Amino acid sequence: MNKETKTEEVEYDGALKEDFDGREEIKPTTEEVTVDETPQEEEEDFDPAYLRTEPQVVGYQSTEQQEVLYDFVLSNFDPTRESVLDLGCGRGDFLRYTEEAYQHVLEYHGVDMNKQLIDVAKELSPDNKFTSTNWFSLDGNYAADWVLNINSTTILYEPEGPDFDQVQALRNTVNKMMELADIGIVISLLSTVAQDAYDESFLTYDPIETLDWALNEFGANGGNVKLDHSISDAVFILTIYK
């Protein structure tokens, strides 16, 4: 498998990467949570154009910030040859960005618990597969070469209660992703290195602790686990090859 297949359209732009410098700029917005938790009867109050286009709806401050993260994720595999299961897909922005950048129809299935965003995804990309469900309920019928989880870790994976353990919740998610992946997984996480940039509603993870666990859990063959923290202090990307 050639993991270096990148086209000119998605080479990193230094100006875009600057969007991730400085904690205040990378700080996730709370608008994604607002969209997710709005009671059903109030959903009609949102401007449809806002839901379809604004990056804040899916947790980014700008389109440039969003695309920088997508480029880092795409550097791990070849979307022209390998299929993708996108967990926490939102409106399917990653799908449309990738197809535009590579000028290729991606073999893709997007999954998100937010039915409103899935409805928007189906409207924007009617020829693609989108499912509104909890990703822990997925079985082998959803398997793909690569399973992605991009910027959806600001939402609790499991019901929060007195016994909630966010580290175990992350591990449950990674294990589920590995179960569904034929080649590997990529997941982006908020880092404790820039923990002061977030309020208590966001989940941050220790990159060293996360890497140690992944190496112990999946690194028996050596060289199949990597962590990239170069995108910014606030975000790191964990990639695991099967």
Image (spheres, grey):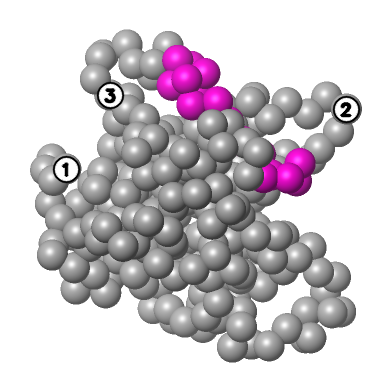
Question: Looking at the rendering, in which quadrant would you find the C terminus?
Answer: top left
Q: Percent from the top left, x then y, of residue 93?
A: 44, 69
Q: Which residues are magenta?
A: 198-213
The residue wearing badge 3 is 224
Label 1 and label 2: CA atoms lie apart by 42 Å
Task: Check disc 1 and give the amino acid type.
Answer: Lys
The residue wearing badge 1 is 3
Q: Percent from the top left, x then y, of residue 128?
A: 40, 72
Q: Percent from the top left, x then y, of residue 153?
A: 59, 45
Task: Check disc 3 and give the amino acid type.
Answer: Asn
Q: Earlier in the sequence, mark 1 or mark 2?
A: 1
Who is closer to the viewer here, 122 or 54?
Answer: 54
Who is closer to the viewer here, 193 or 83?
Answer: 193
- Name the residue located 54 percent from the left edge and 62 percent from the top edge: 60
Label 1 and label 3: CA atoms lie apart by 13 Å
The residue wearing badge 2 is 162
The picture quadrant where one finds residue 211 is top left
Task: Check disc 2 and give the amino acid type.
Answer: Pro
The tally of labels here is 3
Residue 217 visible, this orientation: no
Callout 2: 10 Å neighbours few (<14), some, many (20+)?
Answer: few
| Image vertical order of residue 140 relative to residue 105, above or below | above
The answer to whether 10 appears left or right of 138 in the picture is left
Q: Which structural element holds mark 2?
A: loop
Is residue 7 in the magenta section? no
